[in-house]
Amino acid sequence: MIRIGSVTIPEKISLSPMAGISDSPTRRICRKFGAAFSYTEFVNTDELVHRAPKALKMFRYKPEERPITFQIFGNRLEIIAEAAEIAQELKPDIIDLNMGCSTRKVSLRGAGAGLLRRPLLAGKIIEAIKKRVNVPVTAKIRIGWDATSRNYLEVSKILEESGVDALTVHGRTKEMAYTGFADWDAIGEVKLNRKIPIFGNGDIKSFQEANSKIDKYSLDGVLIGRNAIGNPWIFSGVKKEELSWSEISDVILQHVCWMIEDYGEEFGLVLFRKHLVKYLNGLEFDPAWKSELLEIKEWNRFEDLLLSDKR
């Protein structure tokens, strides 16, 4: 059990926030199999301050997702603080500042991982958010901008002194994006030097590996990203390769049902395709069956084909 400010997190392993992935249906599937809490996709504070419907819609969640963390990103202190106050109206349990997004359109304008180059500003942003909201405030960082500026100890110190309630550290630099390997020794250094809860993130491939990292580096928890897509069982220690097709297809159908509820039939099925590809990874099937499944835009046809003998 972990305490982040006034919020209790029941377990130690959870789904990492991922743009285009960690929406409400995906978070619910992961929670069903043991993920400790939920992060929304990150939302642009420049849109939030104008109460743009598209931005507010990204904060949709169900009661069973609590504790729920709203993740925001931006590069202007006053805008971010105002957006956090608006986000709080939707009753999140925690608000998180994204300082890890490595995409050029975010980081090169000084948002996401761009804030790693201005740690004092990042600290002031945390202070400003905390003055405007009454929920815990956290941040998700990387270990630096590039190999020559691995300033994770400086950044984490400034954020802690600014009042941040917890930190997640992705063990890569901005320049690495998702190449190479996460540096878990660096994550461990942050934990050793900070008093607030520290979560690690990067390259976790199994429930067992997650617990091993927690134990080795005395971490408060671990977030799993890409390896949880199409594999919510990773949060419960169940190996997908040991499951029957019936067990896997039941979860696929539950996930796609929730996608359709949230997005409508056609768009829900289209959005689900990226998840379906991952659910099918490592399984034996007829490639023509998979290709047909990935083209379907009607629920009844999808269900019939998924459960048919054509596989």
Image: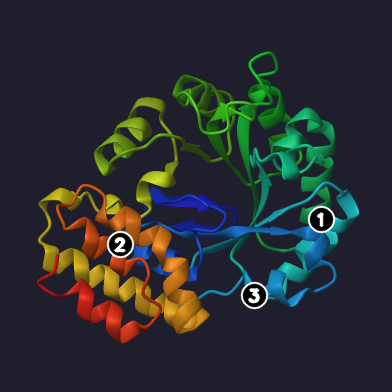
Pointer 1 and pointer 3: residues touching (CB < 8 Å)? Answer: no
**Of callouts 1 and 2, which one flags the residue occurring earlier in the amino acid sequence?**
1
In the figure, 175 relative to 79: above or below?
above
Q: Quadrant for residue 90, please give it.
A: bottom right
| Label 1 crowd bin: few (<14), some (14–19), many (20+), radius 10 Å | many
Residue located 63% across and 37% down the image: 141
Check disc 3: other Cα within 10 Å, few if <14, some if 14-19, many if 20+: few
Which type of secondary structure does the marked residue at label 3 adopt?
helix
- Does the image show residue 91? no
What residue did someone put label 1 on?
80
Which residue bears the numbered disc 3? Answer: 57
Secondary structure at numbered mark 1: helix
In this view, the residue in front, 187 or 279, is 279
Dot 1 or dot 3, earlier in sequence: 3
Residue 197: percent from left, percent from top: 53, 41
List the single residue furthest toward the front. 288
Q: Earlier in the sequence, mark 3 or mark 2?
A: 3
Image location (x, y in percent) of residue 219 = 44, 35
Which numbered mark, 1 or 3, is in the foreground of this view? 3
| Of residues 36 and 195, the one drawn nearer to the viewer in this rendering | 36
What is the C-alpha distance between the residues marked 1 and 3? 18 Å
Which residue is at 51% across, 79% downward? 263
User: On the rendered image, what quadrant is the C terminus found in?
Assistant: bottom left
In percent of width and height, residue 250 lies at: 21, 72
Measuring 50% from the left and 76% from the top, which residue is drawn there?
267
Mark 3 or 2, which is nearer the eye?
A: 2
Instruction: Give the residue type that dot 3 points to.
Output: Lys
In which quadrant of the rendered view does residue 150 lie? top right
Measure the C-alpha gap from mark 3 to mark 2.
31 Å
Where is mark 2, residue-wise?
291
Reply above or below: 86 against 95: below
Type of amino acid under label 2: Ser
